[in-house]
Structure formats: C-alpha cells, structure tokens
Image: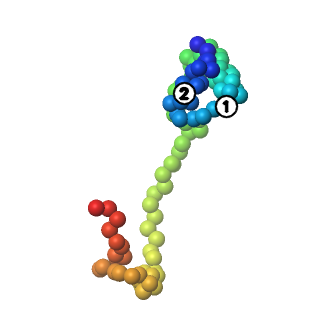
Amino acid sequence: MAVTVSDVKAVAALARLELSEGEEERLTGELNRILEYMEKLKELNTEDVEPTSHVVPITRAFRRDEVIPFEQRDALAVSAPQLDQGYFRVPRIID
C-alpha cells in the first residue's frame, strides 16, 4: 500500500503541521521508500534468529550502591536557612 499526498496531508493536519507542497511531495516519497524497505525486510528468513530486545547484550546495567561517608555536614548546615533534626527544611511544593 503506497502513501499518497492526501495521506501526508491528513497526518500533517492531525499533528497540526503546516507543510508546503514541496514538503508534502518530499515526505510522500520518503515514506514510500521506507515502506518499500520494510517490505524487503519482510522477505528475510529470520527463522533461526533469536529475538532480542537490545542490539548489544546488557551486562551489569546497575552497579551496587556504595556508601561514602560525608564529613562536611556541619559546614553545609551553617549555610542552610532552616534545619530540622539535622535535615534541611525546604518549602512545601506539593499540596
């Protein structure tokens, strides 16, 4: 199924895009080339290809948390506008 200029106009209207006639023609051609390429991909024999979610295998995506002592708490507390039991007190932003 080929994309027509009217298809491009309809999608542009839904997206509230204003396209010139030249842009409509160019996008129609580009979309048709993309669809032709997808048809070629459908012809590939992928029977023995294992499905993947990532092109490159992900290993150790998350690192372990490492506790690092912070020795300058008192120096920061001096510049804090308000402290409450050693914690910074900030204005409420969510009702």
Rendered location of residue 69, percent (x, y): 44, 74
Which quadrant of the figure contains the N terminus? Answer: top right
Image: 84 above or below 68:
below
Real-space Cα separation, disc 2 to disc 1, in angstroms: 14 Å
Image: 64 above or below 1:
below
Residue beneath label 2, please?
A: 11
Image: 92 above or below 38:
below
**Residue at 29%, 80% in the rendered image:** 85
Which amino acid is tagged 2? Answer: Val
Judged from the image, the secondary structure of the residue bearing numbered disc 1 is loop
Mark 2, Cα crowd under 10 Å, few <14 / some 14-19 / many 20+, is few
Q: Nearer the viewer, mark 2 or mark 1?
A: 1
- Answer left or right for 83 relative to 49: left
Rendered location of residue 10, percent (x, y): 54, 25
Image: 92 above or below 24:
below
Which amino acid is tagged 1? Answer: Ser
Residue beneath label 1, please?
A: 20
Query: Toward the viewer: 90 or 85?
Result: 90
Q: How is the image coloured?
A: rainbow
Judged from the image, the secondary structure of the residue bearing numbered disc 2 is helix
- Answer left or right for 87 relative to 41: left
**Residue 30 seen anywhere in this rendered image of the structure:** no
Query: Toward the viewer: 26 or 62?
Result: 26
Rendered location of residue 41, percent (x, y): 62, 19
Mark 1, Cα crowd under 10 Å, few <14 / some 14-19 / many 20+, is few
Rendered location of residue 7, percent (x, y): 57, 21
Which quadrant of the figure contains the C terminus? Answer: bottom left
